[in-house]
Every structure is written in structure tokens, then in C-alpha cells.
Image: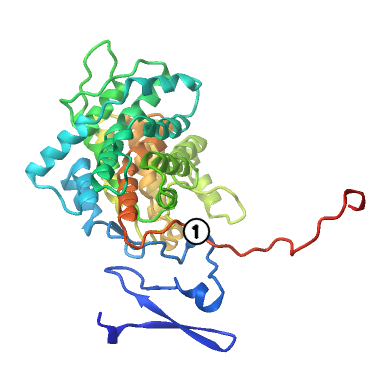
């Protein structure tokens, strides 16, 4: 856009007008650049939850909620999930383009070379109770990684940033699998360099020293797709947390640990776990009608978990593919008649056909299907958010690197609308 074509938004305060430039992106809403608002007017904007605030400019991910579209670097999520491996998608997010064959092989070899964790780090697990939530373990262990890699802590150096990003992507599967093993009292399994990223994770999760573990290729592919679908999702709560922590100059291990803490919240990463808990509460197909009726009752606190999405006002594009993967996994494992899975299918069918849910766009989302798939694979519900964190780590480190290398990068400092006491004087103790 030329200078003559620049658009402005005019704000009038007490009869005085101020112009602010309008910025246009590749896709999505235009934004009003209000960075000079405070200096010009002495005022700030109020936007609780940042629902109408663009906190950064980014080239990584775009969501079109109205049309149910998710793009990674311009590529539709369904095409990436169906045609690329998770590590190819990780390469895309980090580097901006999909790898060719040579680049793909080199990147896979690089990640494999970093998959082991320092042996002293394994002793950190003994500091946790055996029944500690795996996410609590992850917050501590991932944050502790910064104590082991002093060789790449100059984040003004792009090579140091890349080293840290690769280490996090490589070590998250090992750390997640160790959290699971520690929880169930089984020995840690070391990574195998002859397995791919997702197959290796399943080996570390489910293998034991008692005999060889052969990952089922159908289940490996299903979990790899789950990783891809959760790799990044624009400026969500945990990604914003990583960016805000990183804006202070904190190391990426601490920033990702902060992201994991945010993801742990039930309103964010715990949705697929909540979905399984809901299915357990319903218990049987015969009670689906009762719970559908409750979901429609605005005076009933019950809500259908795994249906609808805050961003997508249409069908979640990730859910379409996840639904297909779910059917393939259940067929592979012969679980079509499993009680919980039959219940999920019945609930899905009614919600897709019921006029109330269709009118309100309460379609099954990715969390509804991914929880079912993970349970079928053998992953306990307590590990669901850990799996989410493993996948989202790629997006977190990419967003962190983009922020650090941005010429407009500043420490995050949201403002507030103060509604507390006005200025008052402290009285002597005897007069209070």
C-alpha cells in the first residue's frame, strides 16, 4: 500500500480528534495501530481478555474462525496432516517452508541427535511424589533444562536460538515419556535412533526392558497427526504466555515451562481430558438423551465438553481429519464396540443432527476426537495435556524466536483500569 493509500481511524476525545493508522495483514481483520494512543491522548484502551487486541505481528499461523480454516505458513492444516510428518511440519514452522528430501533427512537426524537427556536430569524425577500429576513434573523438568545448556544462552545469536529450539523439540518426547514411566513405576526407556520421532515416543512410553516393542504403524500415524494438529494455534493463552515471558529476555526453557503451566489450565489444554470425564459421567448410550436435554437447558450448569470452539464459529478444521483418524484407530484395535467409544459415537451423531447444536455451530472439535484416540492407544487421561504440550512446543519455540528477532520487540507491559481505593492516608494504629 502506498503512502497515499494509507487508511486511518479517527478517535474523538472531548471534542479533539486523533488519527491512527490502519494496518492490513495478508488475511484476517485489519488492525488499528494505537501504539501512540497514550502519548497523544493520555488514555489507554480497555480490552479484557485481549479479545480485540493484536499483541504482535506474525507470519506463522492464521485462523479464519468464521470459515473454519487453519493455516501453518499459508498451508491448510488438513493438507499438512495428511501429506506430511510432524517433523516436516516442525521444519515448516521453524524455517518458513516445507523441506525437500535432503533437508527433511538432515532435520530428522538433527532432532534424533538431541533426543537423549542428561543423565543427571533423570534424577530430578525422584524429587516428585510418585502420584504427582505429570504436568507438575513437566513444569519442573523442562524449566530445569536451562541448568544444563550454558553453551547456547546468547539469544542475540540466531545459532544459539536454533540450538535451544532443536533441543526442546527433541527432548520433550523423552521428558513426557519419563513423566509417565515415573508415574506408573516403570523404568525409563532411552530413545532409539532407528525409530522416527513419534514411533520413538511410543517406544519410550510403552516399551519395557523385558522385550522389544514394535510400534503399530496405524497408531503411530494417528499420534503423529495429533501432534501436527496441535503444533500451533495463533496467539492462544499459552503461546501468549511464552511470548510474554520471553519478552523479558528469559531463556526458552523457562518460557516453555511457563507455557506448560498455562496449558495445564482446564480452560485451555485440559479440554480433551474433560471430554473423557464427561463421557464417564454419562456412562451409557441409554443416557445420551438425558444429557443432551441438560445441555440445552440454560439453567443447567452441565455443558457438552468437546463441542464448539471459542475461535471457530464453523466446524473445527482439525476435527474433520481427527474424526477420520479416530475411526481408523478404533477399527485397527477392534474397539468399535467399546462402551465409551460407542457412547462417544452416539453423542456425536445426535449433536451433528440436532437442530439446536447445528444452529449454534456446536460441532465436535479436535479435543473430542483426540481424547478418544489417545485413550484407545493406551494413553491415560492424566497424560493428555502432556501430549498437547509436546506437540505445541514446536509452535511455542517458533513464536518465541519470531518475537526475539522482531525489530519492534519490547518487553510486554499490559496496562490496567484501576478501580480500587482513591488516595488515602494511613492513620495511627489507635485511630483505626
Mark 1 closeness class: few <14, some 14–19, many ≥20 residues within 10 Å: few
Q: Residue 160 in the image: x percent, y percent?
A: 27, 42
The answer to whether 375 is drawn above or below residue 7 in the figure is: above
Which colouring convention does the figure follow?
A: rainbow
The residue most toward the right is 430
The residue most toward the top is 210
Q: Horizontally, is 256 left or right of 161 in the view?
A: right
Which residue is rendered at x = 46% and y = 67% of the image? 52
- Residue 143 showing in the rendered view: yes
Q: Label 1: which residue? A: 413
- Residue 336 showing in the rendered view: no
Q: Residue 392 in the image: x percent, y percent?
A: 34, 44
Which residue is rendered at x = 32% and y = 83% of the image? 6
Q: Residue 346 in the image: x percent, y percent?
A: 39, 43
Quadrant of residue 298 within the rendered picture? bottom right
Which residue is rendered at x = 51% and y = 78% of the image? 40
Q: Horizontally, is 412 left or right of 24 in the view?
A: right
Q: Horizontally, is 131 left or right of 402 in the view?
A: right
Of residue 253 and residue 330, the one placed in the foreground of this image is 253
The answer to whether 361 is drawn above or below residue 144 in the figure is: below
Q: Horizontally, is 73 left or right of 255 in the view?
A: left
Of residue 378 and residue 196, the one placed in the foreground of this image is 196
Which residue is rendered at x = 53% and y = 70% of the image? 45
Quadrant of residue 407 within the rendered picture? bottom left
Of residue 224 and residue 49, the one placed in the foreground of this image is 49
Q: The N terminus appears in which quarter of the rendering?
A: bottom left
Quadrant of residue 323 within the rendered picture? top left
Tell me the element at label 1.
loop
Amino acid at each position: 500500500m502506498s503512502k497515499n493509500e494509507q487508511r486511518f481511524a479517527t478517535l474523538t476525545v472531548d471534542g479533539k480528534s486523533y488519527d491512527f493508522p490502519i494496518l492490513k495483514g495478508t488475511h484476517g481483520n485489519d488492525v488499528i495501530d494505537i501504539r501512540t494512543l497514550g502519548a497523544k491522548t493520555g488514555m489507554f484502551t480497555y480490552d479484557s481478555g485481549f479479545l480485540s487486541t493484536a499483541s504482535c505481528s506474525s507470519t506463522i499461523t492464521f485462523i479464519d474462525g468464521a470459515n473454519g480454516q487453519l493455516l501453518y505458513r499459508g498451508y491448510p492444516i488438513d493438507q499438512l496432516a495428511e501429506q506430511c510428518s510432524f517433523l516436516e511440519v516442525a521444519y515448516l514452522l521453524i524455517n518458513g517452508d516445507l523441506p525437500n528430501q535432503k533437508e527433511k533427512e538432515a532435520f530428522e537426524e538433527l532432532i534424533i541427535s538431541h533426543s537423549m537427556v542428561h543423565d543427571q536430569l533423570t534424577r530430578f524425577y525422584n524429587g516428585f511424589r510418585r502420584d504427582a500429576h505429570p504436568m507438575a513434573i513437566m513444569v519442573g523438568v523442562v524449566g530445569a533444562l536451562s541448568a544444563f545448556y550454558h553453551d547456547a544462552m546468547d539469544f542475540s545469536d540466531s545459532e544459539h536460538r536454533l540450538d535451544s529450539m532443536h533441543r526442546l523439540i527433541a527432548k520433550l518426547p523423552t521428558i513426557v515419556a519419563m513423566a509417565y514411566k515415573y508415574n506408573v513405576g516403570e523404568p525409563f526407556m532411552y530413545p532409539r535412533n532407528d525409530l522416527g520421532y513419534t514411533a520413538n515416543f511410543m517406544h519410550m512410553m510403552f516399551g519395557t526392558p523385558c522385550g522389544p516393542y514394535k510400534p503399530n504403524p496405524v497408531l503411530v500415524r494417528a499420534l503423529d497427526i495429533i501432534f501436527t494438529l496441535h503444533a500451533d494455534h495463533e496467539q492462544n493463552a499459552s503461546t501468549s504466555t511464552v511470548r510474554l515471558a520471553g519478552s523479558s529476555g528469559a531463556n526458552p526453557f523457562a518460557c516453555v515451562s511457563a507455557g506448560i503451566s498455562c496449558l495445564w489450565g482446564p480452560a485451555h489444554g485440559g479440554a480433551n481430558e474433560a471430554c473423557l470425564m464427561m463421557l464417564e459421567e454419562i456412562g451409557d448410550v441409554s443416557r445420551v438423551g438425558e444429557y443432551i436435554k441438560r445441555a440445552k437447558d440454560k439453567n443447567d450448569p452441565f455443558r457438552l465438553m468437546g463441542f464448539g470452539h471459542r475461535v471457530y464459529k464453523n466446524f473445527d478444521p482439525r476435527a474433520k481429519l481427527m474424526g477420520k483418524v479416530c475411526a481408523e484407530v478404533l477399527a485397527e484395535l477392534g474397539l468399535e464396540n467399546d462402551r465409551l467409544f460407542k457412547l462417544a459415537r452416539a453423542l456425536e451423531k445426535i449433536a451433528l443432527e440436532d437442530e439446536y447444536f447445528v444452529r449454534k455451530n456446536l460441532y465436535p472439535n479436535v479435543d473430542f476426537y483426540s481424547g478418544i484416540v489417545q485413550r484407545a492407544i493406551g494413553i491415560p487421561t492424566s497424560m493428555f495435556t502432556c501430549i498437547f504440550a509436546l506437540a505445541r512446543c514446536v509452535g511455542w519455540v517458533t513464536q518465541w524466536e519470531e518475537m526475539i528477532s522482531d525489530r519492534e520487540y519490547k518487553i510486554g507491559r499490559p496496562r490496567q483500569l484501576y478501580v480500587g481505593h482513591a488516595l488515602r492516608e494511613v492513620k495511627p494504629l489507635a485511630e483505626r
